[in-house]
């Protein structure tokens, strides 16, 4: 009777843990409840089969039946898995390999303790739980890469299965085989564990190297993007300098114009003087406003505020940006240019009655805090990454440039849409 109880317990542990391990590797479509239901069903079948084979004293038949039943169960359970046929077969063979290694190890370790039949069961349970914990905590990401590359590793898994399975099927007495072939089996288990361990370690290293390469490419892409944007910004600043130079020439020539008007008035040419004044009034000039001490940012703000004024948009600017920054001022000027350009474009699309104020501010809070807000259309949304989403081709370049600047300088970038207001906060 004790043998029946110990065999039932040991078989039940194997059955339930195999199902849990299989669906840990393969992922069930229907969650943990269906997995537990399958495990309970497998437990009932196992108890019945254990009792049947015990009545005939055939432990070898019981061992073979359990493996065959698990193979049949594996075929029947495929529709419950999310994986493809080949990945499922790969996961199934891995589960069988682990099962055979645990059976071998628990059998020989159980001999070292009193009541080996119960020690065998407890050690088997411990090894299964340790395996499940290891996969859930550490190995599953690498095992998924292992499964996704099943074409490369399938021969290894099949060879391990054939070598271990040989001792379970080409025998008339499984217990005697496990005892007589103790060291070959233990060496085979060590070789199998070393093979799996080497694969997992290699995949871990390859995954780390791929992550580093991806990060390097991402950084290189960001540097390229910033470089291209900086070149564009340089051209804009050159154009602004040209406009400013022309404005200074106009201011410089104003004195000569005043002398001409004075001369015309002295000569009595009043009509001619009035005509000259009308022509002068048609020439729009903008005073050189100082928005902040930083020349690059000031030039950009001046340029875009003139653009906003020409479109009839209202602006409110308060900037406290020092002349010297711990990073390239041109990069910050580019960020401000993109923010203002996006704001002007966004507000310009609104009906006139909804065009509100474009607010731009920047001040020191230990770090530099740059904020801009403006009314926006209802169709403006944020993507899963928290950045503005646009399906139009060519749009979003400015947003990427701002994100690249934030990543380069470890800045905090936050976009928000609330009550029809689009706002951006950048803490550098």
Image (spheres, rainbow, N blue to C red):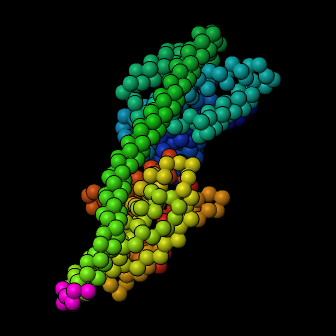
Q: Which of 278 and 217 is in front in this view?
A: 278
Q: Nearer the viewer, residue 110 or 227?
A: 227
In the depicted structure, whether residue 173 falls above or below residue 337: above
Q: Is residue 426 left or right of residue 241?
A: right
Residue in front for this viewpoint, 364 or 169 = 364
Q: Majority secondary structure of the magenta segment? A: helix
Magenta-colored stretch includes residue 419? no
Residue 243, x across and y down, in percent: 31, 62
> Residue at point 38% right, 49% down?
230
What percent of the width, then of the height, locates residue 178? 62, 15
Give the percent coordinates (x, y) of residue 138: 59, 36
Left or right position of 40 against 393: right
What residue sits 35% from the left and 76% below the top? 309
Nearer to us in this view, 328 or 13: 328
Find the magenta span and give its range.
266-274
- Regarding residue 346, the answer to whether it shows in the image is no
Quadrant where the N terminus is found in the figure: top right
């Amino acid at each position: 009777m004790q043998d029946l109880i110990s065999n039932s317990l040991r078989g039940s542990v194997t059955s339930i843990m195999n199902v849990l391990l299989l669906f840990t590797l393969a992922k069930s479509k229907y969650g943990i409840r269906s997995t537990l239901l399958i495990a309970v069903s497998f437990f009932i079948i196992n108890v019945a089969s254990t009792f049947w084979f015990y009545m005939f004293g055939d432990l070898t038949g019981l061992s073979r039946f359990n493996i065959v039943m698990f193979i049949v169960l594996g075929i029947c359970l495929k529709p419950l898995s999310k994986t493809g046929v080949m990945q499922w077969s790969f996961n199934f063979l891995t589960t069988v390999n682990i099962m055979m290694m645990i059976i071998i190890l628990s059998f020989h370790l159980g001999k070292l303790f009193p009541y080996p039949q119960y020690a065998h069961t407890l050690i088997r349970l411990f090894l299964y739980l340790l395996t499940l914990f290891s996969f859930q905590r550490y190995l599953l990401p690498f095992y998924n890469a292992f499964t996704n590359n099943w074409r490369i590793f399938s021969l290894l898994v099949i060879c391990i299965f054939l070598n271990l399975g040989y001792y379970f099927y080409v025998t008339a007495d499984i217990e005697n085989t496990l005892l007589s072939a103790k060291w070959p089996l233990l060496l085979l288990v060590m070789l199998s564990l070393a093979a799996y361990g080497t694969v997992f370690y290699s995949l871990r290293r390859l995954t780390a190297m791929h992550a580093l390469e991806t990060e390097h490419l991402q950084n290189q892409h960001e540097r390229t993007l910033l470089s291209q944007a900086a070149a564009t910004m340089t051209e804009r600043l050159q154009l602004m300098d040209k406009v400013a130079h022309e404005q200074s020439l106009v201011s410089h020539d104003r004195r000569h114009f005043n002398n001409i008007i004075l001369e015309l008035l002295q000569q009595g040419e009043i009509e001619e003087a009035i005509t000259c004044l009308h022509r002068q009034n048609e020439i729009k000039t903008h005073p050189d406003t100082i928005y902040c001490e930083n020349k690059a940012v000031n030039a950009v703000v001046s340029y875009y505020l003139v653009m906003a004024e020409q479109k009839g948009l209202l602006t409110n600017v308060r900037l406290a940006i020092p002349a010297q920054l711990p990073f390239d001022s041109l990069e910050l000027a580019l960020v401000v240019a993109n923010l203002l350009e996006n704001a002007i474009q966004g507000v310009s699309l609104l009906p006139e009655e909804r065009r509100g104020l474009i607010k731009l501010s920047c001040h020191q809070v230990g770090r530099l805090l740059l904020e801009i807000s403006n009314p926006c259309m209802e169709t403006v949304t944020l993507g899963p990454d928290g950045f503005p989403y646009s399906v139009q081709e060519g749009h979003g370049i400015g947003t990427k440039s701002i994100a690249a600047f934030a990543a380069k300088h470890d800045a905090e970038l936050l976009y928000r849409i609330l009550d029809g207001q689009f706002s951006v906060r950048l803490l550098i």
